[in-house]
Image (cartoon, rainbow, N blue to C red):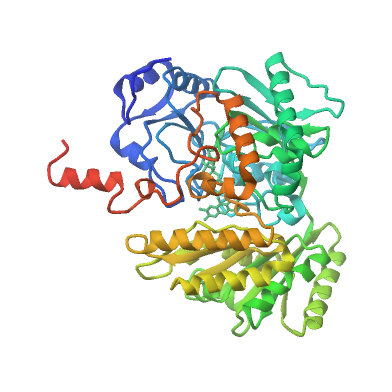
Amino acid sequence: MTSRSIRPGDSALAARLRREVRGEVLFDAASRGRYSTDASIYQIEPIGVVVPRTEEDALAAFRIAVDEGVPVLPRGGGTSQCGQTVGAALVIDHSKHLDRIVGFDKAERTAVVQPGVVLDQLNAYLKPHGLWYPVDVSTSAQATIGGMAGNNSCGSRSIRYGNMVHNVRGIDAVLPEGPEYAFGEVAADGRVEGPSGYRELVQKIRAIAAREAEEIEHCYPKLLRRVGGYNLDSVAQSPAFNMAHLLVGSEGTLAYSRRVHLNLSPLPKHKTLGVCHFPTFYKAMEAPQRIVALKPVAVELVDRTMIGLARNNPAFRATVDQAIKGDPDAILLVEFAGDDRDEQLRKLKQLTELMGDLGLPGTVVEITDAMLQRDVWEVRKAGLNIMMSMKGDGKPVSFIEDCAVPLEHLAEYTQRLTQVFEKHGTKGTWYAHASVGCLHVRPVLDMRKEGAAQMRAIAEEAAELVRQYKGAYSGEHGDGLVRSEWIAPFFGPKLTRAFGEIKDLFDPKGLMNPGKIVRPSKQDDRSLQAGLPDHPAQERARLERVGGIR
Ligand SMILES: Cc1cc2nc3c(=O)[nH]c(=O)nc-3n(C[C@H](O)[C@H](O)[C@H](O)COP(=O)(O)OP(=O)(O)OC[C@H]3O[C@@H](n4cnc5c(N)ncnc54)[C@H](O)[C@@H]3O)c2cc1C
């Protein structure tokens, strides 16, 4: 391993990669600029980028980076919202060429894919077989299976199908120290298949989980939607567990995933959709705990601001006018799905009755037409884009966007968090996964002015609320740069140390996506944030303007 310091654009590293790897080696300033952002507020210039042609090329690039002592950042669609996909590292981008479905077993309902396969691409392949991969993230047209596994992503229908961790059966992954292992099931009797290094790793992880069993029981939120830290709880749950589940949600900090083995689900034959109208936001937030008893597949919130923005968008107006009557403060989209059509229609009627019991008779628009259902879901999926169309200097900023709380606290939590926003002179738009207590909200902040200070204050008060309700601070989007700092306060010192131990077992030199989950920076470290006057990229642009850099 070399010990020289390697800076962005390093020409010797680029030359070695060009000699030994087939694919694009992008070390020029424009490419580095392109890969310095994801969907977060952060901006970090990578050392360079490789777009490998084959799995062998990807592994060669990975091994060269490790040999040169350069951090590695695997990347799919780059749609992460927490800054986990930016870093001063060699970026390996799978989205262009590593997009093959390499195995499919219809009878067993399983598939094996390269990490760059995009969710929509996979589901288009599966549809004629009556199957789908049911972790239906809103970014299904861009999100790759490698990235979804990296983030432990969760879809709108997670109440029925679970998160990535519940739908990944194995991961073939390479450790920075060299070996490649097939991470998968570990039998209840402790038997582990595989090379001795893998067996040893499993025993060590099992020992950490056993040692921390009490902390795991005490500190992990008892919620479906929790994606913070490493999934050590899945190792501790029972003698039989799946080692791949430790890699799920590890944000590229432990190993490089070469192939992902997936469990598939049958496509439901019939769906119905109820659009429930509420006169107040609070009432909308009280309802999900009652609605989930009807066993819907999804319960998604859209609030007044988003309804207004969607109505003003010519692409969505006609759909909104068909599905939403009058001027509700919020709506819940409730979907039922299964093979028996009559059963789904019955459930829709039960939903209407339930809304009557809640004192809101005649407030459900029942949609059985498949095309209109699809159009309504398209509006919901475009939620973030619709919200970002908001005009003004301040923009909705993602940093407490996916906290999750138990359903019985949802109304009180959203009310108190709204008061926190008001106290800090701002407001938030609420939408998304009411079924599982994971709502998206972005306070509107002007990050060029007082926004950074407001962000810190709101983040701390939100954390306190989430803690009081025994919720999860990261309920969907991950930790990255924006939330890793909060792992210690939420998981406590013992589990934080255990996460550090796990990181060191997999990646003793700390080369895998450093600074995420373990040993993080502060969320409001201004040198990492895009668009700020004192960000290094702005400073460099300023120097270039005045002739300071040539
Ligand atoms: C508008 C919008 C809507 C969204 N909606 C949802 C939603 O509904 N549900 C949800 O869960 N998320 C959502 N997200 C977040 C994001 O889209 C998901 O997390 C998505 O699954 C990330 O996929 P990606 O391919 O873009 O991953 P990337 O951002 O490229 O990578 C994600 C992480 O995985 C790691 N990684 C990637 N490939 C590998 C590999 N081969 N080996 C090891 N590590 C790897 C990366 O290093 C990174 O840490 C949304 C984001 C946006 C911008």
Residue 156 position within the rendered picture, expressed as x and y whole percent measured from the top left: 66, 57
Q: Along the line of sight, which residue is nearer the eye, 524 or 403?
A: 524
Q: Residue furthest left?
A: 547
Residue 354 position within the rendered picture, expressed as x and y whole percent measured from the top left: 81, 77
Q: Is residue 293 above or below residue 146?
A: below
For ligand 1, the image quadrant comes to top right
Q: Is residue 314 left or right of residue 123?
A: left
Q: Residue at x 78, y 81 (%)?
A: 358
Q: Residue at x 33, y 41 (%)?
A: 33
Residue 331 occupies which quadrant of the picture? bottom right
Would residue 490 be seen by someone viewing this image from the given angle?
A: yes
Number of labels in the image equals: 0
Q: Is residue 325 left or right of residue 81?
A: right
Residue 501 occupies which quadrant of the picture? top right
Residue 489 position within the rendered picture, expressed as x and y whole percent measured from the top left: 58, 49
Would residue 323 be seen by someone viewing this image from the given angle?
A: no
Residue 44 occupies which quadrant of the picture? top left
Q: Is residue 516 left or right of residue 268?
A: left
Q: Is residue 32 above or below residue 202?
A: below
Q: Is residue 429 above or below residue 157?
A: below
Quarter of the N terminus within the rendering? top left
